[in-house]
Every structure is written in structure tokens, then in C-alpha cells.
Image: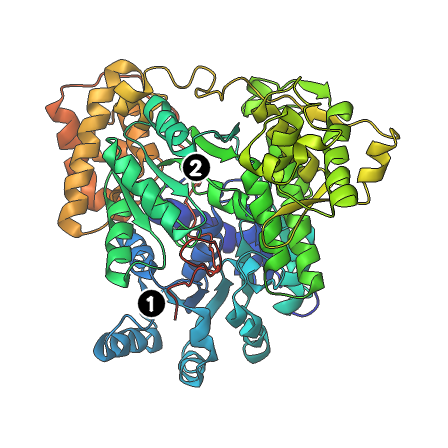
Amino acid sequence: MRGTGVIEEMPEATESEALATLHRVFGYEAFRGEQGEVIEHVVAGGDAVVLMPTGGGKSLCYQIPSLVRPGTGIVVSPLIALMQDQVDALRALGVRAGFINSTQGFDERRTVEAEFLAGELDLLYLAPERLRVEATLDLLSRGKISVFAIDEAHCVSQWGHDFRPDYLSLSLLGERWPDVPRIALTATATHATHQEITQRLNMPTARHFVASFDRPNIQYRIVPKADPKKQLLAFLREEHAGDAGIVYCLSRNSVERTAEFLSGNGVEAVPYHAGLDAGTRARHQARFLREEGLVVVATIAFGMGIDKPDVRFVAHLDLPKSIEGYYQETGRAGRDGAPSTAWMAYGLNDVVQQRKLIQSGEGDEAFRRRAGAHLDAMLALCETVQCRRGQLLAYFGQDPEAAACGNCDTCVAPPETWDGTVAAQKVLSTVVRLQRERGQKFGAVQIADILLGKRTAKVIQFDHDQLSVFGIGQDLGEAEWRGVIRQLLAQGMLAVEGEYGTLALTEASGSVLRREREVPLRKEPKKPATSRSGAASGRGDRKAKAAAPELPEELLPAFEALRAWRAEQAREQGVPPYVIFHDATLREIVARGPASVRDLGTVGGVGEKKLAKYGEGVLAVLSALGEPGRPQAAPATAAAVDEEPDPGYWPETEDEPGPEPEDWM
């Protein structure tokens, strides 16, 4: 019974029915990880809170119960901009799906409502704001509901990076429909956020399923920021030429400038931010979904609802505010499981800017403390000399499976460390001299100039060349001193104050000045690494290999022929190419070389509807290339249906980052 934490006895046919649905609709032979257990629990009527990484197959956890249980599954999704694409993808599988939102006209909305009341929908998508409208609640009360799915459930957390006020009212679902199972899903949540989801959605007896947050196909790389746009261009040319990807910047102006820079240097790129009109945003989003190899340069609002499986990289030109945000944003790469890169350029100004934003931003002291803790964790990830993947997993309360993953920059090229105690004392002493002897506070540039003995105009203006610390730091270069200051800020031995981002001492500074503690620092590399181990060679010249990394050379023509056929089908139907077939499915088709429709039906990702609609076309493409004559590989056994969104909601000004408005309701 619901309310006791014990699910009702499941009919014997339920599991086989769920598996049959998985194969018939989605084309997979077996569930992956905890999918089967989650689905079994929800089909039997139990509530569930599900934490799975992006690309881990969360959507199946509510789609299959919606298909197996009597009635319509109601999916609460936080963004309406991509509901049409989500519904199109389901309809391509033969699923009766619909949505209700403000983009529809009166007649269209009435048609969907009538289909729901007549029991002609398997899934119905709604924005959380809709559930505050009494007319919507009345509509739902007159139909048969199989399950409530609350997607992106972390949006309920008021301490999180994607808070949506309307999620707070979703507890009414359990109160108004106590016999309908609810499943809350998210791709990222710390232990505290996990508890908050359970509490605010009023799901005290829900069963919790927490999968590993590891994304082994993503290589995490953080490089010292020098000339970030040029560093980005080199990264794209050397490793991701012709690939689709997302570049995140904090401000609108930075987005515009970066997109223009990339376009002017031969990389097809478009901007996306809230300052653009809705039509332009929609066009750029549609291009990203429907075209191969387009780069979107965006503020963090972009990505919500994006279910594009072949995003090969996510790059950050500015430091994210939290590990949760970083994990969600980087998680948009490699949903198909193929090798992908999470690349970020990071420098001293990032630290200063983020500290300044926290101190000058809105919110009470508790909010600033929480924001500061989030930033501290993000800085620790940037400055670590240990495995980055291990640190990410530890942040989410999971132990890394191995001491080093072997596929992040700190594992591929372990950074050197050095005893920076004396250097730290020099920096802190300079701050002390300025404050105590002159009553002055300055930023990192002035501190470095004083240590280097530079007689700049500002140094001369304030007589800083008369300080006893002037010129005592000539053993290090300017970039090295900036690195020292950055790491002292990251370790809490320096603080940022005021509108101008001046440096000040902290409680931890005294122990360093008194020689009571050592300060190990990460050595600044001579120049940023721009290629990953064995992965970058030939990437710029071989777009096909970028899309099909594990295919041998002789199979690439067939893969490209299928991609061209898929692109034509997508254009004719006005849907993204991955709605037809994912790259992973095309790779398996090429590797196995099916000779009949029946053989094609055993390929992972080819369900009954797609087999009937596209089977002859696929075989015709292969036949035109000649008899493959290739050995048959084992059929796919893992369901890897990609997820929808990971949101981002922060306003912003023209030059300074801030809250980015969303397209919802």
C-alpha cells in the first residue's frame, strides 16, 4: 500500500510486459543499471526518487510505466521550448504523446485535452506553472492518470543553482491524487539537495535510487586561462573540428563576442542568450538540434531540454558558480556514450569575479555562505592535483571506483606541486604592508607589480616602490604570481572585498605569516596542453572518425552514407536527425551489416515503429554500397535512451553575469 513504503504485490506479467515494451518501442533487449528495478517499483504503484547521470536513461523510468500502467503519464517538465521536440521523438517511436502550453492555439490545446480525456495519450507534458491553474487540475481530475513524473526535481531546491518557485507547489500532486505513483528524477543532487527534494515534494515513503554519477566517456580538462578565445579555437581545431558542441560564457557580451570570433575563424557558431529575441533563440536552438557540427555559444540558460546525443564537447570560458552547475552543463556532452570532452579555461580573474559577485549580490548572509561554499568546492576541483573525476564523485557522496580514472587531465599529465609557503608569505606581507602602513587595499595586479618591482604609473603614484616588499618577488614571473594569488584565494588564505575586488587577509592568513603551516601549490604549466592522450591526432581532418570513433576505416563510407540518408529523412519530417536514429544505432548497423529487415530489428535502438518506417530505406542504403559481408556482432543489451534537460536560470546584465530568464509556462 502507498504511504507505508511497501509496494503492492506486482503481477507476474509486469516485468515481462515492461521488457516487452522496452524491446517493442525502444528497440533494446535489457534494462541498464537500476532502470529495471525503478520501473518495476513504479509500475507496482510505488513512489520513487531517482538520481541518475545525464545519459543514464532516466526518461525510460517514467516512459515505460506510463505505457504499461492504465491511463496517461503526466510529465512535469520545467521548460516548454523543447516540448515539441520531445513529443516528436516519442511519436517517432509510436508513443501517443502530447503537451499543453502557451505556445498552442485554443483549438490545438482543446484537441490535446480531448485526447487526454478519451484515454488516447500515453504521455502528456506540462510545465510546473500549469499545475497552479485550477483549470488544469480540473482537467487532470477528469482523466485517468497512470503516473506523475517530476523531471529535473532539483529545481525544487531553494539552495540549488536552478531553483524554480513553481516546483514548490508540486507536493499537491500526492495530496490530490494519493493513489497515483510519483517519480521525481534529476541528474544531479548533493545529499542536502536529495533530502530537500524528498521533503518539499512530500515524498517521505518514496524509495530512493541513486546511480553512479560517473560519466567515463567524458574527459575533464581545465587549462590555465591565457587568451581564452584563442585557446578555445585551438582546442576546437585540433580536437573537435566538425563536431557539435556548447561553449558557456557568463555574460551576454562575452557570448556575442565569442560566437563572432569563432565564426570569423571558420567555426560555424551561433549565440544564445536572453537578450536575443525569442525568434532568434528558437532558430538557433533548432539549428543546433537539426544540423551536424554546429557550435552554440550561450549563457547557462541554454541546455534545458536539449536531448541531442552527439554533443562532442562542452567548453567553459568562465568559471561556473558550483559543481552542480558544472556537472549538469558538462553532462550535455556525450549522451550517446561516445568519447567527449569537458574543457574549461580558468584563471585568477574568474576567482576574483565570483567572490565579488557573492559579496555584492542579493540575498542574506546564509545565502552568501552557501554560495561561498559552492564556489569553494568548484575552486577545489580546479586546483586539485588529484583525479578530477574522483573529486567530482566524492562531491556527490560517491566513492571513486579507482584511485585514478586515467581519463582526465590530472591523470593523463599529473601536475607538479611545490612548496609555496615563502611565496604565500610574500603576497600576504604585501597585503599587510599596504593595509597597516598605508591604509590601502589593492587588487591582484598591483600586488604582483609590487612584488616584481615594476615601477608602473600606479606604483609611482602611491609610492609603493618605497615599501619594504617592493621587488622581493623577482624569483617568479608575472603569470606565476597570478597563480599564487589565485590559489591563495581558492584555499581561503586571501579574500576579495568591495566593488573593486581588492584583496584582504583572512583568519587563515595569520598561521601562514607566523610560519605555522606550509602552503603546497600547484605549479603553473609553461603553456596549456591542447591535446588529449592519443585522442586529438587527425581529428581536424577526419570528421567521420569524430562521429564514429570506434569504427574501422573501411566502414566509414557506409556510416557516412547512413548519416546522409538520416539527414534527408530529418529534413523531410522537420525533426532533429537523432529522432530518426542515434549515431550509436547507425554505428551498430554498419558494424553488423544486417541483410534483412528481421536482422535489422535485432539492432539496439530499432523498435517496431522505426523498423516498419525506416527498415527498407536503411537496407537500400547498405545494398547500394555492396554486400557488407561482415561478421555479426552481439545485439545491444543496454537501454541508453538519452535524457531531457538540465536547466539554468540566472538573471544577467549586459556585461555582468546574473539571472537568465527562461522560456516557460
Does residue 137 lie above or below 460 as drawn?
below
Q: Is residue 293 visible?
A: no
Residue shown at the point (56%, 19%) measured from the top left: 525
Which residue in the structure is indicated by mark 2?
A: 315
For marks 2 and 1, give the CA distance: 32 Å
Which quarter shows the C terminus? bottom left
Mark 1 belongs to which amino acid? Phe
Q: Residues within 10 Å of mark 2 (few under 14, many from 20)?
A: many
Q: Quadrant of residue 504?
A: top right
Which residue in the structure is indicated by mark 1?
A: 99
Q: Position of residue 278 (x, y in %)?
A: 28, 62
In the displayed orientation, state which residue is furthest to the left: 624
Which quarter shows the N terminus? bottom right
Mark 2 or 1 closer to N-term? 1
Q: Quadrant of residue 159?
A: bottom right
Q: Which mark is residue 247?
A: none
Q: Position of residue 240 (x, y in %)?
A: 34, 27
Given this view, does label 2 or label 1 mark the residue nearer the observer? 2
